[in-house]
Amino acid sequence: MANQELALWRPSTTLSIEQEAQRSIVTLKWSTSPQEALKATKQLIGAWPHANPPDPAGYAASLAAALAAYPLGLVQECCDPRTGLAKTREFPPTVQSINEWCDRRLAYHRGAIKHGEIKAAEAADEAKFTDDHRKSMLGRLQDLMHGLFRQSQQEAA
């Protein structure tokens, strides 16, 4: 027992498809104001303390204009050093890199929403059938499969 390592219990951080879709809906819900974009830009640029652009105000304005085109939740993700651009980039971002990151993440969130809607529709369709109906359909399917199996056995003989 002395050689065994004890692992601390940690709660699951995996979201269900429906929870991920709801999170994406909230992320894409609100637009970004110019003031919010500028605040997010300051946070983003702060992740690279060595950044020394020749025109800091112009650089910040360009990045803020790019961020303002995206939903607020997405901008917050992009500028969060734990999840956004700063997590994967060693150098200060360009407008192009912001647009690429945000476009990829936007596509992810839209896909999550669509997948959640499909899952919800499937669940609604599944709920339409009673247990008796399911048993009946399963029996019919089994009869069909057995019949096909018998037919293939006869043809092979």
Image (cartoon, helix red, strand yellow):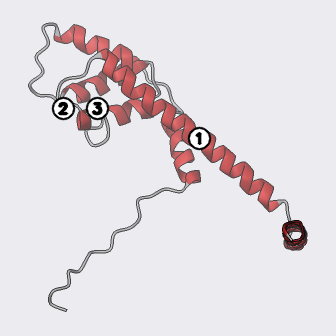
The reply to whether callout 3 and callout 2 are in contact (CB within 8 Å) is yes
Q: Residues within 10 Å of mark 2 (few under 14, many from 20)?
A: some
The reply to whether callout 2 and callout 1 are in contact (CB within 8 Å) is no
Secondary structure, mark 1, is: helix
Q: Residues within 10 Å of mark 1 (few under 14, many from 20)?
A: many
Q: Quadrant of residue 25?
A: top right
- Sequence-first disc among 3 and 2: 2
Of badges 2 and 1, the one in the foreground is 1
At x 25%, y 22%, the residue is: 93
Q: CA distance from mark 3 to mark 1?
A: 23 Å
Mark 1, residue position: 113
Left or right of 88? Residue 51 is left
Mark 2, residue position: 47
- Sequence-first disc among 2 and 1: 2
Total numbered circles: 3
**In this rendering, is residue 63 above or below 144?**
above
Q: Give x and y (percent) for residue 112.
A: 55, 42
Of badges 3 and 2, the one in the foreground is 3
**In this rendering, is residue 42 above or below 112?**
above
Left or right of 58? Residue 116 is right
Give the label on residue 85, or none: 3
The amino acid type, in three-letter code, at marker 2 is Ala
Secondary structure, mark 3, is: helix
Q: Give x and y (percent) for residue 73.
A: 44, 34
Q: Residues within 10 Å of mark 3 (few under 14, many from 20)?
A: many
Q: CA distance from mark 3 to mark 2?
A: 9 Å
The amino acid type, in three-letter code, at marker 3 is Leu
At x 49%, y 56%, the residue is: 15
Seen from the viewer's position, the closer of residues 135 and 66 is 135
Q: CA distance from mark 2 to mark 1?
A: 30 Å
